[in-house]
Image (cartoon, rainbow, N blue to C red):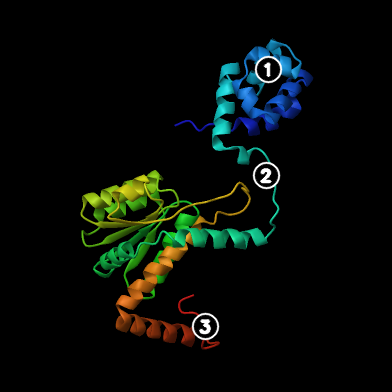
Amino acid sequence: MTTEVDIVSKITECFPQLREAEKKVARLVVDDLEMSAKASITELALEAGVSEATITRFAKAVGCINVRDLKIKLAQSLAVGQRFIIEPPETTGYQGIYESIKSMADTNRKLVNESDVTKAVDFLLDARQIISIGMGGGSTVMSQEFQYRLVRLGFATVAYNDGLLARMVASTADSNDVLVVISATGYTTEVVEPASIAKQYGLKVISITPAGSPLAKISDVSLPIINNEGDFIYKPSASRYAMMALIDVIAMEVAIRKKSRSRDKLRRLKLALDSHRGGDDRQRLGD
């Protein structure tokens, strides 16, 4: 499979080596990608104040086969989104981080369906083993977070973040195991395929992912999230807070449904940790 090269980055990289006439074309293209992707070679030449032959030379100088190939690559860059090309205004400063987290939590709180949470908890309480998988940035961390929340309650929980290993585990797991799949998009092949494999072998699949996604559609129960990300691309995605909140909801419900067991496990956990690290009696459990 060939990976497409970002044409905007390629133009920037090649710019110092371009001829003066070609640099005019480069400035025109980078300043107005949308126009450049749609314009004919004649229109580009007129806008840049160069010959049509210069447009052709420019296309080849930046690694394209011809002008048509250049226009296709420009259109692909536009498809990625203007926010990755044009510098967006940033007016909120670090306070914007806290506001986006709060907004994400408020939006996703309305999506919580108690019957779905109950059904997911039923599956987990009956499971021989709980398998948590997630791929990528936030989803990887959240799959591990799921493991940490349930391990301290005494549940056999493992997290996997490798695509091939997830497929292996899904194909060898027991039918009374439960697969928990966490994905910010629900489209990543490395999580959708293991979930599909697990279903074929009789496992129950719980997902935390956007509604209507391929992952959500094949899950026995799916707890939806909404990713409302703004155009300021430098700020880390707040979607992981929506996933974390659902993990906390599930962990709390699991603990409450088995209060006596949970209390015993947490007490033993605190004793083991406090005797190891010392310190204030109010230290967090397992953290």
User: Is residue 78 visible to the viewer in this orientation of the structure?
Assistant: yes
Q: Residue at x 36, y 60 (%)?
A: 132
SS of the residue under disc 3: loop
Q: Position of residue 176 (x, y in %)?
A: 21, 62
Which comes before the other along the chain, label 1 or label 2? 1
Q: Amino acid at mark 1?
A: Leu
Amino acid bearing label 3: Gln
- Given contact means CB atoms under 8 Å apart, are the residues at marks 1 and 3 in contact? no
Counting residues from the start of the chain, the first of labels 2 and 3 encountered is 2
**In the rendered view, does 11 fall on the left or right side of 162?**
right
Q: Quadrant of the N terminus?
A: top left
What mark, if any, has residue 283 been given in the picture? 3
Q: Which mark is residue 88?
A: 2
In this image, 7 relative to 215: left or right?
Answer: right
User: Is residue 151 among the parts visible in the rendering?
Assistant: no
The answer to whether residue 126 is above or below residue 211 is below
Q: Which element is circle 2 on?
A: loop
Residue for badge 1: 44
Q: What amino acid is at disc 2? A: Pro
Q: For the point 34% across and 80% down, which residue is it? A: 262
Please report the residue visible at 72 percent of the width from the left and 22 percent of the height from the top.
25
Per the model, the C-alpha gap separating discs 1 and 3 is: 66 Å
Q: Seen from this angle, which residue lies furthest front?
A: 110
Q: Position of residue 209 (x, y in %)?
A: 40, 53
In the figure, residue 68 lies in which quadrant? top right
Sequence-first tag of 1 and 3: 1
Task: Give me the C-alpha separation between circle 1 and circle 2.
Answer: 26 Å
